[in-house]
Each structure stands twice: as structure tokens, then as C-alpha cells.
Amino acid sequence: MSIFEPKINSLILKKDITIPKAENVYVAIVNEFNEIYKTNDWNAYVINDKDVDLEMVLIVTSGYSEDKTTSVFRKKLEKLPKKSYAKIELMQEDLFALNNTFKVSFFEGNTMFDKTYLFRKNTINEKALQTIPLMSVKGVLVK
């Protein structure tokens, strides 16, 4: 073996990496009044209903259908304190005709968690509103 050949002592395969299931973290689409523009806006939020802070929260969102795809939106939160929430983005109502995914990854201590939340097309509407945990408002929730 030459000094230019890498020495591999052990191989880590994708099947060997386990990412635990994310629980008590949700994504909600909330219809709320915008004081500045005097309009009702739909906003996406990430909710941390855990008793611990989340660190390095990464959110990747996109919308799609059979013939349309939106651009990808990315957001990073350094910290999402326990029992709190943060706004992800403003959502245009035209997007509700698409499937909307929110891929959320975060660290809890030294462990990485990952979950994809899917709002199926036409499921974000006023008839689907329910009380959102921690926020005391109505919206559409995916757990």
C-alpha cells in the first residue's frame, strides 16, 4: 500500500446510520391578520412542543404537483426554545393547490432528528382550521 492510497478501517453504510423519529415538533399553516397591510395572511410556523431547546433547526420547503414545481426555500434557526414556535414563511394561496413539503432537521443535544411534513393539495383551507398547540390561534396542523 502506498501513502497515497487511503486506508479504510471500517465502512459506515447508509443503513448503519439511524436518525430517531422526531416527536412533539409540528408544522402549522396559520391564517392571521397582518396589522401592517390590513390583510389576512397564511403563514407557516415550526412548533417546538418539547421540554428541551432545539438547535440548528434547518427547514427546506417546496411545493409540487404533476406538472408544477416551486422553487426550494431554506431557513435556518440557530435555536428554537422549548415550548415555542417560529415563523417559517408567508404562503401565497396559489400554493395550496400543490402538495407542500416541509423537511425539518434539528439537533436535540448531540442527536440529529429529521422529519418531513406534507400538506396535501387543497388541504389548507378555512374548513380544516383547528386550534394550534402553544399558539392559541387556528390553523392547519401536520404532526
Image (cartoon, rainbow, N blue to C red):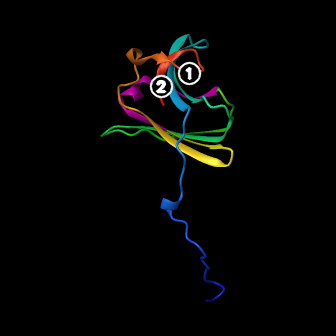
Q: Position of residue 114 (x, y in %)?
A: 54, 44
Q: Amino acid at mark 1?
A: Pro
Q: Marks 1 and 2, how far apart in space?
A: 9 Å
Give the number of the mark in front: 1 or 2.
1
Kindly check if marks 1 and 2 are in contact, taking CB atoms under 8 A apart as contact: yes
Query: In the rendering, which numbered label is found on residue 4?
Result: none
- Residue sitting at 52 percent across and 12 percent down? 39
Percent position of residue 24, x then y: 56, 32
Quadrant (top left, top right, bottom left, bottom right) of the N terminus: bottom right
Q: Is residue 41 magenta?
A: no
Residue in view at x 52 percent, y 30 percent: 27
Say which quarter of the image contains residue 4.
Answer: bottom right
Q: Which residues are magenta?
A: 84-102
- What percent of the width, then of the height, locates residue 89? 55, 29
Secondary structure state at the residue bearing disc 2:
strand
Tell me how many marks there are.
2
Taking the magenta stretch, the answer to whether it contains residue 89 is yes
Residue at image position (35%, 25%) is 122
Task: Say above or below: 2 vs 62.
Answer: below
Label 2 amino acid? Answer: Leu
Q: Is residue 115 visible?
A: yes
User: Which of the 4 image quarters holds residue 77?
Assistant: top right
Who is closer to the viewer here, 56 or 65?
56
Residue sitting at x 66%, y 86%: 3
- Residue 141 numbered tag: 2
Determine which of the numbered discs, if any, sits on residue 133 in the image.
Answer: 1
